[in-house]
Image (cartoon, rainbow, N blue to C red):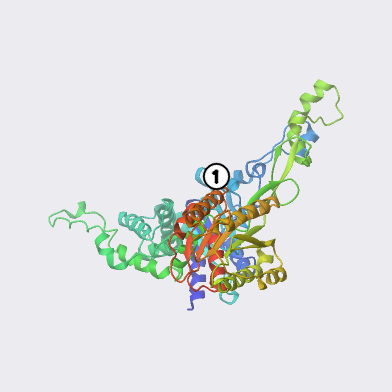
Amino acid sequence: MSAHEARWHSVNLAVACFALDPTSLGGMQVRARVGPVRDRFEAGLRVALAGQALSRMAPTMGDEALYGGLDLAATLQAGALHRTQGILNRGGTLLLPMAERVEPRLAGRLATALDTRRELAIVAFDEGAEPGEHTPDALLDRLALHIDLSDHPLSAAPDLQFDIDALAEARNALPQIIVPEDAITELVFVAARLGVQSLRAPSQALAMARASAALSGAEQVDEADLLLAVELVLAPRATQIPEMETLQDDVPPPPPPAPENQPDDAAEPDAQANQPPAEVLLDAARAMLPPDLLARLAAAKARRAACGSGSGAKQTGNRRGRPLPPRPGRLGGGARIDLVATLRAAAPWQTIRRKVSGDEGRIHVRTSDLRIRRYQETSDRAIIFVVDASGSAAMARLAEAKGAVELLLAEAYARRDHVALIAFRGDGSDVLLPPTRSLVQTKRRLSSLPGGGGTPLAAGLKSALDLVGLARGKGMTPSVALLTDGRANVDLSGAANRAQASEDANLMARFLRSEGVPGLVIDTGLRPTRGLDGLAREMGAPYLPLPRADGRSLSRAVDAALTP
């Protein structure tokens, strides 16, 4: 059996266990783009959940659709209040496509519903293509199963197979499944060694093991059930790889043997005889972890430390973008009225208002009923390169910057990035390129740049601060990447004064930090330069020494540090 076939078999088993006890498991996250593999998974899920409520919801669903609201047409027609039933009140399993687009507001409501409402589960389809796109953590924590089908081939994804009668029998037998006490201890121990921070994970793993035991027709949880729970619930949440050689020191000692003269009728049932020790579970979990786990975790940590802004900050307007729930407001200032929401707000008061006015033939709308349309759009990102063009090695550094800028611009159209370029040398700095996405213009400006002279680092940072204001004025989200291999020796006035130049550079760095601008300080010297790490701290940015870096490595560094 190939690796893909084995994974699909585990998916088949996971769906069957989920169908037995959706409420205890909370749900599952399925990372897969729209396509035939996902279609086969969803078709199998519907077969396994036959007879149970199954509904589809939108990632932008408002409170009225969630909890129920006013039935506008029925209310206006009957002259009495009629309400609709919210999707959360129906219970059952909810299918959530595009889960990576769920806003924190909706994620919080769904998490609360999973915590407080019985007979509710969520299957979240995560279609995120970029590293920063993922299902909100508050929702992920409550979904026991995490399945990744993003690279699964269709040839290894046959129709999921289920025995409906066997599922019904297992569902009836589930409450009688015996869970040995040692199994609970071992699951908690394995979760801790894998670095799983969630306190819900061991409980979800236990529910998965119980469902697996019921599905196999056993009366109690055994080794295979625990291994399946570790594979599908704990291993996908691992944040570290456990060191196997130190396990013996952490395993609790076995209980003392029972006295030989103990009567047979007082002996405890040997429910734990076949339970695997924690070492076996951890060894299996280690084999299930992806080989690039540490690399992915390190990259995510670097991005969080950089406080990156991604493809741009979110901003609210009333013209375009992703629709947000309407809010009470007044007309004027370009605001657009949401007619349906306004009528919903006015409908409950029609009986009273008609009696007061004596006019039965009209719909009475007050200023307090007005609801304004709101949208959320993502601003473009502007990366401002501040390049040291001083000294004899200036041309080499500019060639590196040119390669990095060109590589980033190659993806600018897909990610909506803009690039700006500032060079500092001699006694000042020059803005060679304001924020642009034009690759031809960038090459033209870089080709004729001279180098040499002192290092007016403060002037370069001051020009970056000016460009930050310009980019924000155009609705963009700026970030600054500083490339240098030397300490400042020219102050803001253009005089050669190393002490004042260092003070001015730190002052400009603090200004950038106070503006909340994400940044990155790249040391391109042959060895780390004294003082640049301190400047990075003043700027609130990561310090990254990259000796002999080429354009591709600079591009990767900037993308990793300035992308969440």
Front one among 300 and 471: 471
Q: Which residue does the image show at 71% across and 67% down from the upper left?
A: 438
Residue 378 in sight here: no
Provide the residue designation for mark 1. Answer: 113
Nearest the camera: 9 or 284?
Answer: 284
Q: Please tell me how many numbered marks the rendered image carries.
A: 1
Q: Is residue 109 visible?
A: yes
In the image, residue 314 sits, relative to residue 161, either above or below, namely above
Identity of the residue furthest to the bottom in this view = 1
Residue 303 lies, in percent from the top left, at 51, 59
Picture coordinates of residue 61 (x, y %)? 66, 48
* Front position in the image: 68 or 100: 100
The residue depicted at 50 percent of the width and 51 percent of the height is 23
Residue 217 in percent (x, y) is at: 42, 62
Residue 416 appears in which quarter of the rendering? bottom right
Horizontal side of residue 41 vs 448, given as left or right: left
Residue type at the position of mark 1 = Ala
Counting from the top left corner in percent of width and height, residue 311 is at 62, 58
Q: What SS does tag 1 mark?
A: helix
What is the crowding at mark 1: few (fewer than 14 residues within 10 Å), some, or many (at least 20)? some
Q: In which quarter of the view is residue 554 placed?
A: bottom right
Question: Where the C terminus falls, by quadrant?
Answer: bottom right
